[in-house]
Amino acid sequence: MNAPAPTTVKSYLRPIDRDGLLAFAEKGRNNPASRGTNKVHTVMQGIYRSLSYVGDHEAVVVDEPLHLFGEDTAPAPGEIVLSGLGGCLAVGITAVATWKQVKLSKLEIFLEADIGNPAAWGAGGAPMQPEQMGFQEIRVKVLVEGDATREELDEIVKHANFYSPVANSMRNPIPFSIALAD
């Protein structure tokens, strides 16, 4: 008796609502100046551990590693920033793939950035200028698979990167203000 030939089953990531996406895109085309507002409330617990509240979600916990005098109970601020970038790129890649009617079966994003703190947060460390601090380079690698060619997937990733709100916030100078609360 001959054994049945093995079959390959391809599963896809859960899709988003394409009709809703197209309606959202049309709304943006009709009102390109529209803006939303993200709001976060951060409360320091002590040492370097803080809780950031976003809407009705569980708090995002931020800490510093032991070598930076934190307790290493949660990701560091820079890691949280990179996670926001990774999430935004993943959303964008998913949206562009959906728009182009490409089904994705895998999407993973690997991010790393070079950061230093010789200024010691301005607490007596090396005197530095703002452009010398923070991320000095960000590197992103995208592992994406779906029912498209490698070239088409590469174009989806590039398109999503170009339109990523978080990537553009990091690439481009933006007005920034800070003041004591009333």
Image: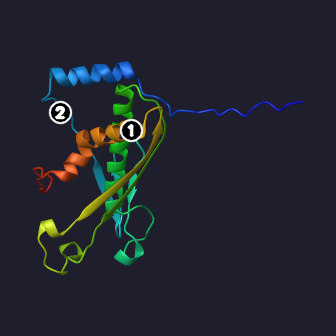
Q: Residue under circle 1?
A: 153
Relative to the observer, which residue lies in front, 166 or 112? 112
Residue 159 location, quadrant: top left
Relative to the observer, which residue lies in front, 165 or 60? 165
Give the percent coordinates (x, y) of residue 86: 36, 49
Q: Kindly identify the residue that appears in the image at 13 percent across and 66 percent down.
A: 130
Instruction: Look at the numbered discs 1 and 2 and tell me whether their residues touch, using CB distance below 8 Å.
Output: no
Q: Kindly identify the residue that appears in the image at 69 percent across and 32 percent down.
A: 7
Tag of residue 20: none
Quick one: SS at disc 1? Answer: helix
Q: Kindly identify the residue that appears in the image at 27 percent across and 72 percent down.
A: 116
Q: Is residue 135 visible?
A: no
Q: Horizontally, is 170 left or right of 49 in the view? A: left
Q: Is residue 84 visible?
A: yes
Q: Horizontally, is 172 left or right of 2 in the view? A: left
Give the percent coordinates (x, y) of residue 38: 25, 41
By what rule are the colours in the image chosen?
Answer: rainbow
| Mark 1 or 2, nearer chain start | 2
User: What residue type is disc 2 on?
Assistant: Arg
Q: Residue furthest right?
A: 1
Quadrant into which the N terminus falls? top right
Please determine whether, in this image, residue 86 is positioned above or below residue 35.
Answer: below
Mark 1 or mark 2, whichever is nearer to me: 1
Quick one: SS at disc 2? Answer: loop
Q: Horizontally, is 121 left or right of 141 in the view? A: left
Give the percent coordinates (x, y) of residue 106: 49, 41
Q: Residue under circle 2?
A: 35
Q: Residues within 10 Å of mark 1 (few under 14, many from 20)?
A: many
